[in-house]
Amino acid sequence: MTAPAEPHVMHTYGRLPIALSHGQGCRVWDTEGREYLDALAGIAVNTLGHAHPRLVPALQDQVAKLIHCSNYYAAPLQEKLAAKLVEISGLTNVFFGNSGLEANEGALKIARKYGHDRGIERPEIVVYEKAFHGRSIATLSATGNAKVQAGFGPLVEGFVRVPLNDLAAIEEVARTRPNVVAVFLEVIQGEGGVNPARADYLRALRRLCDERQWLLMLDEVQCGIGRTGKWFAHQWADIRPDVMPLAKGLGSGVPVGAIVCGSKAAKVLGPGNHGTTFGGNPLAMRAGIETLAIMEADGLLGNAAEVGARLRGALERELAGLESVIEIRGQGLMLGIELDRPCGELLRQACDAGLLISVTADRVVRLLPPLIMTRTQADRVVEILVPLIKKFLASPAP
C-alpha cells in the first residue's frame, strides 16, 4: 500500500496508507478496489453502515429541499427529532449542535450556569481519570489524558478528577468540595480504553446527585444511539441523567450533536446564552430522524445486543488462556480487548488483512461496527482478528 499524498492537509492524524472510496452495508472499498470488513463504523458513527437503501434516498430528498437555514426561524425537523429523543430518553428538551465536542462543551456551560444561578461563583465539575470529552480547551481540560493535553496549557480550571467506579472517592469530594455542581462521565469510556461504569456505581451517583442537588451529566457520544443494545448505555442501570450529550451515531455519518436535558437542566440556558450557525440544520435533522426510524423498524437495538454478545463470546472463547490478554470488556457492539503491551501495529496488520478496527489507550483493540452487522460478519471479524492477536502476542514483547 502506498500512502496517498496530502501536501496541503495539516498533519494532525497518523493515517493508514489507504483511501476509502465507497461502501455498502458493513463493507468498504479503497481507491485501489480492495475490500474491507468495517468493524469501526467511522468510530461509532455509521450506525446504519454504508449506502443504506432507505437513508440515502431520504437524504437526497432533503438536499433537494433545504440543506441549511438560520436558527432565526422555526425548525420543524428540529422539533420532530427532539420529540423522538425526548420519547426514547424520558428527558424533556434538546439543543442541537454539530459534534460530540460541541455537545460536551454545551453541557459544561450548562453546569457552570446552573452553579452561578445557585449563587456559586466558582462552580466545580467532577470528571474522571481516563475520560475523553473532546479537544476544545474546556473539553480537553475535562479529559483525563495528559498526552492529549500536553502543549495546550494553561487548562481551564474548575474540574475535580476522580477514578471511575470508586464510590468512596466521590463521597470524599462531596464532603470536602462545597462548590461542586455536577458530575460528568462517559457511561463507557471510549478513547480511554472501553471502560464501563458499573450499574451500581451509576445508581449511587444518581442518588448522590439528587441529595446534593448536583447535575448528573452522562456523555453518551460514543456509547449511545443503540450501540450497547439499549438506546442509551445508562438505561442498563435504570437511571436517567439530567444532561446527556449525544453525537456520532445519531446522524449515521451526517455531522450532528445534541444536548438532551431533563427538567433540572432544561431551562438553565436562555436566549443569548448559547447558539450555533450550523446546528440543527435540516439535513442533519433529517439524518437523525431517519436513523432512529430505521433502527426501530429493523430492530437494531436487539441486533446490537445479540450480535455483540456473539462477538464477545467468540473472542473470549478463542483468546481464552492467553495470559497477555488482560480483559475483554464492553457491551453490545462496543467492545475492547486489552492486551499487556502497546498494540498499535495491529491497526495496520488488520487493515492488511481486510479488517478495519481501532487501537485506543495504547493497548486496547476496540471494535465499534455498524449496528447492522450480521452474525456471519461478526464471525468473520473473529476469524481475521484472533490469529493476528495470537501472532502479535507470540512475538517478543518490546
Image: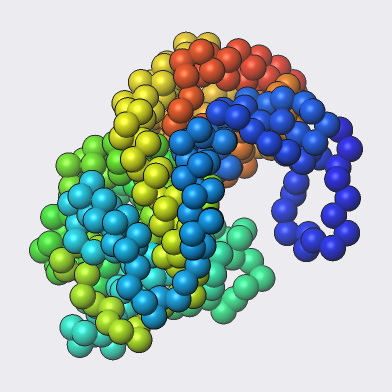
Residue pictured at 29% horizontal, 56% vertical? 80
The percent coordinates of residue 24 (x first, y second) are: 60, 29
Q: Quadrant of the N terminus?
A: top right
Relative to 358, say whether 72 is above or below: below
364 left or right, relative to 291? right
The percent coordinates of residue 332 (x first, y second) are: 38, 29
Residue pictured at 32% horizontal, 28% vertical? 299
Asked whether 385 or 316 is in front, the reply is 385
Asked whether 247 or 81 is in front, the reply is 81
Asked whether 88 or 298 is in front, the reply is 298
The percent coordinates of residue 163 (x first, y second) are: 37, 53
- Residue lying at the far left of the rendered structure: 211
Would residue 6 be visible to someone looking at this image?
yes
234 left or right, relative to 22? left
Picture quarter containing residue 324? top right
Residue pictured at 54% horizontal, 70% vertical? 136
Asked whether 177 or 77 is in front, the reply is 77
Residue pictured at 40% horizontal, 76% vertical? 71
286 left or right, relative to 217? right
